[in-house]
């Protein structure tokens, strides 16, 4: 039982539950069934993006372009649906995923095959992709009355009483769990993050693995781009502006090591859920938006400190700390 309580994921889950209860004592409306259902729905996009970001971070990388990829895919899917309203919705969604996949593969090729630094590459493509949103839209919005009804209705439509967003997020969690725990691809990513030199020595195709890892991150951003635009029924140039930092924060809070090689699907899910609880709870208790940002930053810094302390290697003693002094004849006493 003590070992279980020491697990990072269990501690984070308990903190999340405690936070929900604490806010519920101040504002009982927060813990009603409808409020908790909305909270779960609100957390879905963050959780989905955190899952693929986790795979990237495990390889000692980072994808700063994820929110810009989301914005570009979301804008293009909205433009496509508004100009071709008779186009089947599955094709629009597939187009959004394909756009995101292409953007991610560009990142992955530059990082994997050209051996460029992930933070530099994705920082550059973040600006490029965000700029393309302006270019393609001409700076204009695509509003709800320009989009087909089924395009807007899909994310919040219900199946067995649960929104499509939650179903999609649930399937994403299962897929990420299988990739991370039960596939050769996932095992290779952890090997790359733990020791790239050894991974190369045993024949892991590092360049290919990195390219497709960033491709997965881009594809997820593309899917979330459609879901974001459809859910909020508007596409504009600053969609999800700065959201990439929230995604990375969810991973860090969930215990995914920024040094690579360590992290779990449960941690990414709980990190996203924890941030969603904070984001929904603070306005309910009438906390200023300025304090919301500050408190979120404090949580992130605390998580980084915990990760650093937990991941600090323990040195091994190779020689005795105190050597016996030699006696007069030169032999040890």
Image: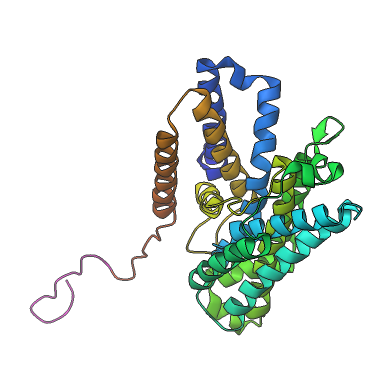
Residue found farthest to the left:
328
Q: Which residue is drawn at 53% across and 41% down?
A: 3
Query: In the rendered structure, does residue 329 fall within the stretch colored magenta?
Result: yes
- Which span of residues is magenta-colored? 320-333
> Considering depth in this image, is 161 or 178 the residue closer to the camera?
161
Examine the rendered structure and indicate whether residue 113 appears above or below residue 280. below
Q: Where is residue 169 in the image (x, y as percent from the top left)?
A: 74, 45
Q: Residue at x 66, y 68 (%)?
A: 104
Look at the picture and state if 206 lies above or below 63: below
Q: Position of residue 170 (x, y in %)?
A: 76, 44
Number of callouts: 0
In the rendered view, would you say 294 is above or below 314?
Answer: above
Dominant SS of magenta comes to: loop
Q: Is residue 116 left or right of residue 322?
A: right
Locate residue 132, reporting x and y percent.
62, 66
Residue ID at (68%, 78%): 208
In the figure, residue 108 lies in which quadrant? Answer: bottom right
Residue for point 59% across, 44% down: 272
Q: In this view, does 322 lie above or below 211?
A: above
Give the x, y percent position of residue 171: 78, 48
For the residue pair 315 and 94, the one nearer the viewer reads as 94
Closer to the camera in the image, 42 or 298:
42
Q: Which of 55 and 247 is in front in this view?
A: 247
């Amino acid at each position: 039982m003590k070992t279980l309580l020491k697990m990072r994921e269990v501690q984070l889950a308990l903190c999340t539950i405690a936070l929900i209860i604490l806010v519920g004592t101040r504002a009982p409306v927060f813990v009603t069934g409808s409020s908790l259902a909305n909270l779960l729905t609100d957390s879905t996009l963050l959780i989905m993006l955190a899952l693929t970001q986790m795979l990237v971070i495990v390889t000692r990388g980072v994808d700063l372009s994820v929110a810009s990829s989301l914005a570009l895919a979301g804008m293009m899917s909205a433009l496509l649906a508004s100009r071709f309203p008779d186009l089947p919705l599955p094709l629009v969604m597939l187009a959004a995923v394909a756009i995101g996949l292409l953007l991610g593969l560009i990142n992955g090729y530059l990082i994997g095959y050209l051996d460029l630094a992930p933070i530099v590459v994705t920082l550059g493509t973040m600006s490029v992709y965000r700029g393309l949103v302006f270019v393609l839209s001409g700076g204009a919005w695509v509003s709800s009355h320009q989009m087909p009804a089924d395009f807007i209705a899909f994310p919040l439509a219900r199946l067995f009483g649960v929104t499509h967003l939650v179903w999609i997020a649930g399937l994403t969690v299962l897929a990420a769990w299988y990739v991370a725990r039960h596939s050769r691809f996932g095992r290779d990513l952890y090997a790359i993050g733990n020791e790239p030199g050894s991974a190369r020595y045993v024949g892991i195709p590092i360049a290919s693995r990195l390219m497709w890892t960033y491709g997965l991150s881009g594809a997820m951003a593309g899917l979330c781009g459609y879901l974001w635009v459809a859910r909020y029924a508007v596409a504009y140039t600053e969609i999800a502006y700065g959201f990439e930092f929230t995604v990375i924060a969810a991973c860090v809070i969930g215990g995914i090591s920024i040094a690579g090689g360590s992290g779990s699907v449960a941690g990414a899910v709980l990190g996203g859920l924890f941030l969603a609880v904070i984001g929904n709870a603070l306005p309910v208790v009438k906390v200023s938006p300025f304090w919301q940002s500050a408190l979120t930053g404090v949580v992130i810094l605390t998580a980084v400190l915990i990760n650093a302390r937990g991941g600090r290697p323990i040195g091994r003693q190779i020689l005795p700390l105190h050597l016996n002094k030699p006696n007069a004849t030169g032999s040890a006493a």
